[in-house]
Amino acid sequence: MTAAVIHHSQNRVMKRFHETGAIRPEQAKTPAEIGLRESMVFRALCRRGVIRPVEAGRFYLDPVAETDFRRRRFRFTVTVLGIGLAALLTALVLALIYGS
């Protein structure tokens, strides 16, 4: 999966929790009740603590962990884009200086 597809899938999973109101332990629901399956993206969000399990296969979205996750993901994206832009500019400058 590309980064954009993963990003979109993560957003879709988190949105489903919000739409069904499963954002506190007492509002936890099974993936089927939320309209999800326990996909690779779902499990990854669980490992990161964004989706938290409670009893009997029920889960809820932790809004604080979600905000932190989105911040870290944004910072990572900006960093990668910045490095790519710096590499592109370096290549352009070198091509102008040493170009044929």
Image (cartoon, rainbow, N blue to C red):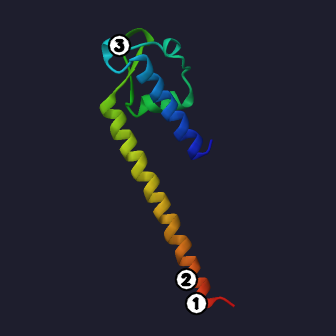
State the image quarter where residue 26 is shown.
top left
State the image quarter where residue 88 is shown.
bottom right
Counting labels gives: 3
Amino acid at circle 1 = Ile
Residue that numbered label 3 is attached to = 27
Q: Secondary structure at mark 3?
A: helix
Q: Secondary structure at mark 1?
A: helix
Decide which of 24, 41 is in the foreground and name it.
24
Amino acid at circle 3 = Gln
Q: For mark 1, does the 10 Å Cα neighbourhood hold few (<14), some (14 to 19), or many (20 or more) residues?
A: few
Amino acid at circle 2 = Val
Q: Secondary structure at mark 2?
A: helix
Separation (CA) of disc 1 from disc 3: 62 Å
Residue that numbered label 1 is attached to = 97
Q: For mark 2, does the 10 Å Cα neighbourhood hold few (<14), some (14 to 19), or many (20 or more) residues?
A: few
The location of residue 50, given as percent across then percent down, is: 38, 30
Residue that numbered label 2 is attached to = 93
Disc 2 + disc 1, Cβ < 8 Å: yes
The location of residue 39, given as percent across then percent down, is: 56, 26
Q: Residue at x 41, y 23 (%)?
A: 18
Q: Residue at x 57, y 45 (%)?
A: 4
The location of residue 2, given as percent across then percent down, is: 61, 45
Q: Residue at x 37, y 31 (%)?
A: 49
